[in-house]
Amino acid sequence: MLCLWNQILPTSSKNMKFNKKKDDLQNPQILSLDDDFSLIKRFIEGDETTFRLLVQRHKDKVRNITYLTLGSTDAVDDIAQDVFLTVYKNLKRFRFESQFSTWLYRITVNKCKDHLRKKRIRNIFTSIKEEEEEPIYHSSPESKDTAEIVRKAVDELPDKLRIPLMLKDLEGMSYQEIAQTVNCEIGTVKSRIFRAREGLRNILKPYEKELML
Amino acid sequence: MTQFYKEYEMLSAYIDGELRADEIKYIEEKLAVSKDLQQKFAELKRVKELSQTSFSKVEPSPYFESKLIANLESDHQNKFKFGKWIPVAGISLATIVLMLFLRSNPDFFESVIEEQKSKIAGLYTDNLKPLFITAGLTNEDIFNFALHRKLPIDKEKGQFLVLGTNDDGSEYFEIKTSTISDYENDFEKFVQALNLNEKQKNQIDSILESYAEDMKAQVLVNENNTVAISPKLWNYNKAIFADVMAFAKDCNYEQYDKIVPAEFHQIDKPQLIEIAEVVKAAEDSDYIFMTPDTIFIESFTFDTKKFNNEMKKMQIEVEKHRKEAEKQLHNQNFVFKIDKNRINVHSKGDKQNRFEIYIDTNICRVHIPNIDFDWSETTLPKLDELEAQINAATKNLQSFTYRIPKDEKIRKNYEVRVDVKDSSQNYNFNFNIPKIKIPFDPNTLGSDSILRKSEAYSFKADSISNLIQKYFNDPEFFNRGDFKLEMKEFQREMQKLREELLRLQKDLKKEQPKVKDAEGIEI
């Protein structure tokens, strides 16, 4: 079933293969049931129930991107809710010039960036007021949990390096999809992902033995 | 960009499967021969493995959809809640309409206020009657008014309307109890002192009587507890005095100099007559209305002729009724069925004040004693009521002082004093607001100088730049638009911090208050 196939495949490859299948498909009626564009068209025509289908399809991805972008689970649901509210309000103006998922993830990343920006400013002022001795993102040498060490190291990366790295390594997006999501050139994505890995390696240098770097 | 850097970057993309075929071929060839590239490849691959394996998927949220639907519905309802905009829209529309209307009718409010004012004034000015009609002003009263500025309101209770002049020349009136004996027979003494003959006596009587009529309209009262006083009363006082003095000077110049105060000697007769004429000719229709609610000055015309006619009619009517009543009372016969056993029974009591009853076998005749007509039963105003009216109307005519209690913040009392003591009803509000000196100049709060000096707050600019460098170690970053936006946001937050610090500084100052008053004394 096409529906099952759509759920199993990651979004990027799903869309790619979907397009290939579209040409071969004998019955386009069945296809339109699961196609994002078809759902959006039905939504625009007044069938708002299709929005629920879009949410069901993309909510996990949106929540996961939010989590990876933020580096914590604190505000994941709030931001994801906000993302879908924004989508709902603007869906009737969708221009079908890019994949729905690309548009959706761009909104998600932008919301996350906005949240991080506010959080960072709050942190700056908190550190000034309370005269915190060290920045909040700092690896603790005592920590022996490898995954935790890596997560903290990733957190120390600037957003512009960390977000493409996460979208690539965790979400499996292509450079092109990442470029569209974060609104930059593919070459920039390539450079940033490399710099992110280099930066991560430098941060993790104290643990190179434990981490077998 | 160095060749090494470019190849490292290609290695990273190679690991991600993002290289074209020619790039793959190139990097694989390089990788085969370069130990450095091989080491970098291993490092990058390991870093990728670490990042991929260190993060787990976020936990599913079972209520995500239902919460979203609820949020959407709430948002949808708010969007279409026109009801909440109705008051705003209504007020806006009403404002626009009002503005347009006022633009085309600039005098609208003034006319409405005037109309309402006259309507309210009408409530108070309705059915005003002269106060002195009941008091019955005699020539002695008029003379005393001219000399002592007192008019009797209720002679039995010794209540007088007294005119006075303040030190600043402003005039006032008051209603107070006084003894009439102070000025008793002053007019008679005056007549005797001047050795007036009968003709001259009649002349002075005539002069005073002529004013009595005019005086009626100067103080009016009604059943709504309104007392209306004409400001002309003060002028009448001067006019009567001038008229009397002119007459006295004319009649007996020698005696006049003896009995009249020295300052009046210089005023000649034409001057005195002129004063009287000017006062009589003045057409001032304003009255001071004192009501239980308010005091106001309003134009009002009292129709003396009409009132006199009404009074005459009423007197005729009263007289007619009195005669009829007397007639009816004297001729009233009562017929009873008589118990013959009670024949020739006479009632007991004083002959003058008893009913006389004569009974025979057929009739019973009761003679009602001669009863004088009781004037108290007429509808004329009662002095008791007048007293209440005047008391109510004048109860607010007094000075009062209000003091705001001591307050640590104010540190000196504010005083509000209201004086209502003159005829023109001037309200004087005196606010003694203290000048408080504070230990710093508030005008300097906006400058950076305070922040520069405020080492005590541990605000170190270096710490910010260190943090920024730590977060944004990319030199290109600082030229990007998003960084500039962030910096603007940062500046806004800095402004907030500065305001917070200033508040803190103020609070610290408050803890050591050294406030001085205008004289430089610490309070």
Image: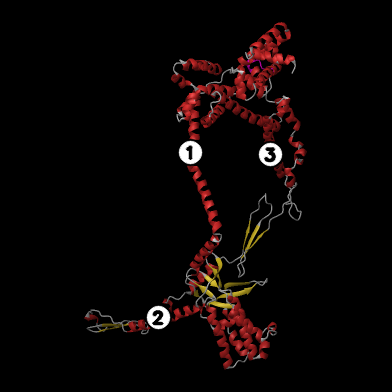
Q: Could you say which disc has been placed on residue B317 in the image?
A: 2
Q: Secondary structure at mark 3?
A: helix
For badge 3, the amino acid type reads: Glu
Q: Is residue B135 left or right of residue B409?
A: left
Q: Position of residue A156 (x, y in %)?
A: 67, 22
Which residue, given by chain and number where applicable, does mark 1 sit on?
A: B80
Mark earlier in primary sequence (3, 2): 2
Q: Position of residue B350 (x, y in %)?
A: 36, 83
Is the magenta region chiefly helix, strand or loop? Answer: loop
| Spatial CA span between label 3 and label 2 | 87 Å
Hey, which residue is sitting farthest top in the picture?
Answer: B33
Question: Do the residues at discs 3 and 2 belong to one chain?
Answer: yes
For badge 1, the amino acid type reads: Phe
Question: Crowdedness of circle 1 by 10 Å Cα count: few (<14), some, many (20+)?
Answer: few
Q: Quadrant of residue B256?
A: bottom right
The residues colored magenta run A141-148
Q: Nearer the viewer, mark 1 or mark 2?
A: 1
Q: Chain of mark 2?
A: B
Q: Is residue B432 above or below residue B382?
A: above
The residue drawn where x is 54% and y is 54% is B100
Q: Is residue A72 above or below residue B30?
A: below
- Which quadrant does the C terminus of chain A fall into? top right
Mark earlier in primary sequence (1, 3): 1
For badge 2, the amino acid type reads: Glu
The residue drawn where x is 73% and y is 7% is B35
- Assess whether residue A40 is covered by the magenta stretch: no
Between B69 and B497, the one lying in front of the other is: B69
Between B107 and A199, the one lying in front of the other is: B107
Q: Secondary structure at mark 1?
A: loop
- Which quadrant does the N terminus of chain A fall into? top left
Which residue, given by chain and number where applicable, does mark 3 sit on?
A: B500
Between A62 and B351, the one lying in front of the other is: A62
